[in-house]
Image (tube, rainbow, N blue to C red):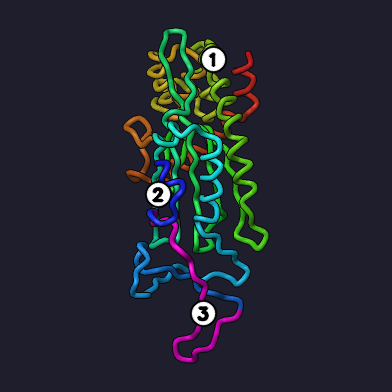
């Protein structure tokens, strides 16, 4: 993969974006304060000169081509990591909506931290960087970095990660993304250290029951069965078989709920990323709540 970090020609995601005026079909008059974004009709830089439509945006929209962000970031990777690490690094590009939405994912199999439960079970956390860029005005340029468990190009991302974002404006620059690269190398280790503390922290079933009832606002009436709290507790019991009856096992149960469409945690529509994104936000709020922090510190 080292060659991919130094080349600008063998990855389709490095396609150029052109700005053109928006004109009426019959009048040929230019639309005020608008421009059309296009790219080659073939991502391999088609020699026919044909272009395809990406979107119409405001004139103040700053086009940020993927290579403008990725090449400096990749140079930083080359300067930081040993060549043997880069050789095993995996790159996956996703180009959606004819190029209007792009994802670039960098996974480092050799850069990881492990936590070990008291029973000897080990969980590995790999370092990942994921860039999201758009050419349709639908969002900022975003860099996700850290311990990313699940990533789908439909927008579902789960794990413990930092987000760096910059809008498509005239003041756009890549400095924030380069700073995020350095910061993540520190925070990734700190996050895993937190997980290790959780793996070393016993939590009773009674406390888990009460905590889940409060977080999910589930009814405590024993006649009510199969509430979200009940199902999370069952997941906690399963996670505890390998991870011990610990805060980390409870955290893993919440992660399973937030990132999987399963018989225990079904979504209304298979693969409904919107539902899973809402679950991730919900779990994030739970683990940042005062009652969670009080229980973890107890």
Residue, disc 2: 93
Image vertical order of residue 20 relative to residue 111, above or below? below
- Asked if residue 18 is among those painted magenta in the image, a careful observer would answer yes
How many numbered discs sit on the rendered protein? 3
Identify the residue at image location x=55%, y=84%.
30
Where residue 280 sits in the image (x, y, percent)? Answer: 49, 37
The tag on residue 207 is 1
Real-space CA distance between mark 2 and mark 1, rounded to the nearest whole angstrom: 44 Å
Q: Would residue 171 be found to the left or right of residue 9 on screen?
A: right
Q: Which residues are magenta?
A: 11-32
The kind of secondary structure element at disc 3 is strand
Q: Residue at x 53, y 10 (%)?
A: 202
Q: Quadrant of the C terminus?
A: top right
Please name the residue shown 55% across and 12% down the image: 201
24 and 86: which is toward the camera: 86
Q: Are marks 2 and 3 in contact (CB under 8 Å)?
A: no
Q: Nearer the viewer, residue 72 or 127?
A: 72
Q: Please tell me which residue lies in front, 27 or 290.
A: 27
Q: Are marks 2 and 1 in contact (CB under 8 Å)?
A: no
Residue 295 in sight from this viewpoint: yes
Q: Residues within 10 Å of mark 3 (few under 14, many from 20)?
A: some
Q: Badge 3 is on which residue?
A: 22
Q: Is residue 141 shown left or right of residue 259?
A: right
First in sequence, mark 3 or 1: give its number. Answer: 3
Q: Residues within 10 Å of mark 2 (few under 14, many from 20)?
A: some
User: Is 269 drawn above or below residue 200 in the view shown?
Assistant: below
N-terminal of the pair, mark 2 or mark 3, is: 3
Q: Secondary structure at mark 2?
A: strand
Pair 3/1: label in front: 3
């Amino acid at each position: 993969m080292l060659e991919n970090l130094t080349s600008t020609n063998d990855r389709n995601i490095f396609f150029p974006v052109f700005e053109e005026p928006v004109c009426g079909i019959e009048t040929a008059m230019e639309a005020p304060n608008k421009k059309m974004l296009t790219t080659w009709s073939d991502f391999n830089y088609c020699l026919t000169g044909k272009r395809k439509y990406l979107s119409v945006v405001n004139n103040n929209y700053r086009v940020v081509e993927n290579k403008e962000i990725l090449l400096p970031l990749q140079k930083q990777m080359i300067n930081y990591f040993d060549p043997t690490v880069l050789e095993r690094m995996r790159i996956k590009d996703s180009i959606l909506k004819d190029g209007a939405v792009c994802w670039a994912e960098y996974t480092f199999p050799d850069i990881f931290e492990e936590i070990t439960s008291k029973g000897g079970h080990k969980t590995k956390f790999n370092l990942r960087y994921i860039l999201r860029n758009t050419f349709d005005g639908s969002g900022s340029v975003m860099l996700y970095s850290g311990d990313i468990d699940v990533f789908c190009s439909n927008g579902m991302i789960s794990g413990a990660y930092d987000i760096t974002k910059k809008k498509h404006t005239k003041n756009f620059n890549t400095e924030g993304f380069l700073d995020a690269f350095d910061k993540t190398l520190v925070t990734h280790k700190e996050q895993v250290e937190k997980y290790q503390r959780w793996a070393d922290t016993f939590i009773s079933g009674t406390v888990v029951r009460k905590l889940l009832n409060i977080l999910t606002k589930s009814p405590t009436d024993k006649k009510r069965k199969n509430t979200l709290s009940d199902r999370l507790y069952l997941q906690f019991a399963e996670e505890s078989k390998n991870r011990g009856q610990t805060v980390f096992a409870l955290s893993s149960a919440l992660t399973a709920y937030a990132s999987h469409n399963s018989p225990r945690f079904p979504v209304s529509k298979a693969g409904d990323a919107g539902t899973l994104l809402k679950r991730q936000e919900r779990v994030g709020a739970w683990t940042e709540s005062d009652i969670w922090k009080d229980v973890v510190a107890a």
